[in-house]
Image: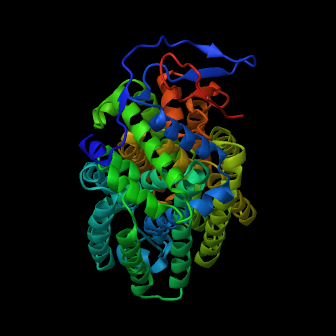
Amino acid sequence: MEERQKEGIPQLRLNSSPVSPHTLSTPDKSPIVNASTAFLEDTTSHKGLAAAQAANDDEHALTFREATALFPKAILFSLGISLAIIMEGYDNSLLSNIFSLPQFREYFGKRLPNGDYQVSAGWQSATNAIGSVGGIFGLLLVGWMVERVGYRRSMHVGLALIVGAIFITFFAHNIITLFFGQLITGVPFGMFQGMASAYAADIAPLALRAVLTSFLNLCWCIGQFIATGAMKAALTRNDEWGFRIPFATQWFWPVPIAIIVFFAPESPWWLMRKGRRNETKAALKRLTAETMPEEQLENYLQLIDYTNEHEKHVQEGTTYYDLFKGSNFRRTEVAAMAWACQVASGIWLSGNITYFLEQAGFDSQHAFSFGLGMTGLTCVGTIASWFLSARIGRRTLYLVGLTGMLAIELMVGAMGIPRLSSGIGYASGVMLVLHSFIYSLTIGPVCFTIVPEVPSARLRQRTVVVARSAYQVLAIGANFLSPPMLNPTAWNLRGRAGFVWASICLIALTWTFFRLPECKDRTPMELDLLFERRTPTRAFKHAKVNAFRFTEHEMTAHTIQSE
């Protein structure tokens, strides 16, 4: 407030006069959502509020091409920080498939009566799952850290931690050391997940939000592709360096990412929450093109201020407790379940494709070739999803994706009933590749858009932390459940594991149909109003949002319509 007075900026205050909340509808029965419980007005004029309204209009009017021209540096910094997710995708794929390396099994496993070597299903499950436990600790740490020191410093702490953690896994000489190495490694990976999507959503204009947030899934896929390629190359070595070199490759990423983070600006939304208005404007300048008019930049600043003040009036705090109060409870549920659906979809079935195919009779070279082809297709699927998300929307892609994956899981399960043959093995492999492609085309990348766009701006980062923690808890269960299904010394279900995942996927599909709203083409202010008014799930897409009113007497709100 003092900073505004020094700058001579008109002060904004909340209108305390109540306006009765009416439930309205248009002739086509689309609901109208009004900003009637709280809105901002200038104490002397409409300048500040009109500027925020103009910026909101610009958000809807900007095309993808225009947005890339106006926000080139926002794209650069968002993509650069998202590269940290490559490391997590790499590590996840490495741990899922490294048990397929003969030299790894011989070094860490035990000899079976048939002369083969296997790491026990228990250690496979524990080593895969412990990274998720570390991830939860990392998420809780970064939730506390970002609120105090911001995204940039928190990212540098995470990058320093990952450099040290890699030493443990690289020099591991027994499965116990590898286990604890994965626990420590999971901490910075959890930190990256808690920051990357929230930062991307903070700095991305509406036209670029889906691409910049879902780019995280492409980074995940790139990491998996590199890991699969590294392990396929490692098959040419018969010594322990065959599995140590893939661990060492992870040291490539932290330094270039740290340099990008050093030059990146802090999130404007975080700075505004801290009352640092001058720095907020400076951050916006660093994210936008030099050709952006000063008036348009000021309008965006007013929109951030308007939204922040509105959310302060509605929810007051930014604590974890506030996530479960009022309309925020529904938003937290949507974010957490959207991420939980990734696990429930059954992606763990195709995620372990190399080990699955080896147990189905494939040799290691062919199994890794299948895996490499699959991860390459996931990159293609993620890029294709950017065009689908902009046209079809998030909710539809979730419904289509879960339905397709459910059908494939049932088919893989059915192929696991007859006696194993090479034909069934190849057919199962092809179906799993298709299974992974559907995931990367739909819920894989779309989830990274839904989770950071659903929360209020003030609670975005904490909501991402809670949502990702829900994912990690389910991932722990999936990591314990998946290896015994395929391990010949345990349940040995092979293709019949598809039936298990299909039943879980059906639960996710049911939740999506009844609870997942469509948030495409909605600004943070509009989403605030839709959730505050308890708009029905299937009415989100066509609701007309009156996001701005100048005073309670001038009920000439600007209507924003999403067709």
Q: Quadrant of the N terminus?
A: top left
Please name the residue shown 40% across and 66% down the image.
264
In this rendering, the count of numbered labels is: 0
Q: Quarter of the image holding residue 9?
A: top left
Question: Which of the two residues, 321 or 64, is positioned nearer the viewer here?
Answer: 64
Colouring rule applied to residues: rainbow
> In this picture, is 389 found above or below 103?
above
Residue 432 visible here = no
Query: Residue at horizontal 67%, vertical 44%?
Result: 397
Residue at x-position 39% and y-position 52%: 268
Q: Nearer the viewer, residue 556 or 340?
A: 556
Q: Quadrant of the C terminus?
A: top right
The spot of residue 409 in percent (x, y) is: 65, 47
Position in image of residue 463 (x %, y %): 39, 41
In the rendered image, residue 361, in percent from the top left (x then y), is placed at 63, 68
Residue 449 is at least partly visible in this image? yes
Q: Is 563 displayed left or right of 451 in the figure?
A: right
Question: Residue 12 placed where, x, y %?
Answer: 37, 33
Q: Is 308 placed above or below 354 here?
A: above
Nearer-the-camera pick, 2 or 84: 2
Name the quadrant containing residue 222.
Answer: bottom right
